[in-house]
Amino acid sequence: MADVICFGELMMRLTPPGYARFLQASSFELEWGGAEANVAVALAQLGISVDMVTAFPEGDLGQAAINALRSYGVGVGKILRREGRVGIYFHEKGASQRPSRVIYDRKGSSAALADPSEYDWEEILRGARRFHFTGITPAISSSAAQATEDALKTAKQLGVKVSCDLNFRKNLWDAETAGKTMSRLLRYTDVLACGLDDLAAMFGIKTDAPDRDNIPEGKYIRIGAELKERFGISTTVFSMRKSISSSENDYAVRLYDAETGEICDSAEYHITIVDRIGGGDAAAAGVIYGMLKGYSPQKTAEFAAACAAFKHSVEGDFTSASKAEIDALIESGGSGRVSR
């Protein structure tokens, strides 16, 4: 039995070599990625037992996706094999003032087509301590949204704690539909990772601050308290990202504990980005890890920020950071000195 269950879609990721644009590409590098799977891989690398729940088609491509998860130590015994296809996303890496771009090709994927009744959530969640999902999964189809809600209801019945990364994707659904659906799902959620832009778009929760890089701490406390009142969220995790360019960011984690009213800020990391995708997922994994291990809110925030900072240095969606590497990064203060 796994301690953590992650539910979502793993996709084939196709990226032009180096910093080439889609229009220039004559070939693509193949990797695998998806928000919930990225969290699962990060947790497995940290030594947590974790199962991925999703659906793939029969055949070589579905098996290749399963093999990718298995190679990182993620449990694959609960994955469905059914009709459909493997979802794909194309990633164009940004540089300097040119932002990264993503194009989805996931319509008709096995994960989107799977009937909610195919998932036996009581069996899947038996013995688990945490269930993780994101706002992406309910966006890919109505059946995926229903499967997510079924999972959350079962988790609540079984006493399994739930975490969610809001992850609003405007290319998958509009803000109004997203807000209505996620308002329903968040009522089963204990821990929410989110960005201010997503909260504003989906729920109309705004800071009304003129300078987004210098928002007073009190406004975050107000937002966390509102999320507690509206949805029952006990812990809110904010990614504090200052984008200098596509290649450079300053990054930290701010954690609000609604039960105590405590707000904790991690150290800030100045990051030269190798690959930004998966950074927020690594932070979410760090939060889940800290809570499983009984870390204080402050230590959890520090661990999550270090997980995210490390991921920005790794190509692909998946991170490969060990617990020892994250501890060393925290201890060094992000200096990047040679480890001998």
Image (spheres, rainbow, N blue to C red):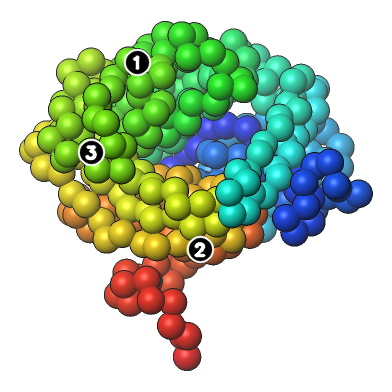
Give the CA separation, mark 3 to mark 1: 19 Å
Residue 284 visible within the image:
yes
Q: Give how far across and how far down residue 311 sits, in percent.
A: 51, 58
Question: Could you say where residue 207 lies in the image, as x and y percent from the top left?
Answer: 24, 27
In this image, 174 relative to 90: left or right?
A: left
Q: Which of marks 3 and 2 is nearer the N terminus?
A: 3
- What mark, if any, has residue 272 been given in the picture? 2
Q: What residue type is labelled 3?
A: Ile
- Relative depth, front residue between 136 and 238: 238
Element marked by disc 1: helix
Circles 3 and 1, Cβ within 8 Å, touching? The answer is no
Choose top left, top right, bottom left or bottom right for residue 219.
top left
Q: Find numbered disc 2 in the image and state the secondary structure of the residue it sits on.
A: strand
Tell which residue pokes out farthest to the bottom in this image.
340
Q: In the figure, 215 relative to 279: above or below? A: above
Q: In which quarter of the image is residue 295?
A: bottom left
Q: Tell me the residue that label 3 is attached to.
A: 215
139 or 248, which is in the foreground? Answer: 248
Q: What kind of element bears circle 3?
A: loop
What residue appears at the point 36 percent right and 62 percent down from the top-left corner? 269
Give above or below for 340 relative to 109: below
Residue at x 70%, y 43% (from the top left corner): 91
Crowd class of label 3 (few under 14; some 14 to 19; many from 20; radius 10 Å): few
User: Upstream in the sequence, badge 3 or badge 1?
Assistant: 1
Q: How far apart are marks 3 and 2 (CA)?
A: 24 Å
Q: Residue at x 19, y 21 (%)?
A: 226
Question: Observer-nearest residue: 139 or 100?
Answer: 100
Residue 140: give x, y in percent of width and height.
Answer: 62, 20
Note whether 141 is above or below 67 in the view shown.
above
The residue beneath circle 1 is 203
Answer few, some or many: residues within 10 Å of disc 2's Cα (few below 14, many 20 plus, some between 14 and 19): some
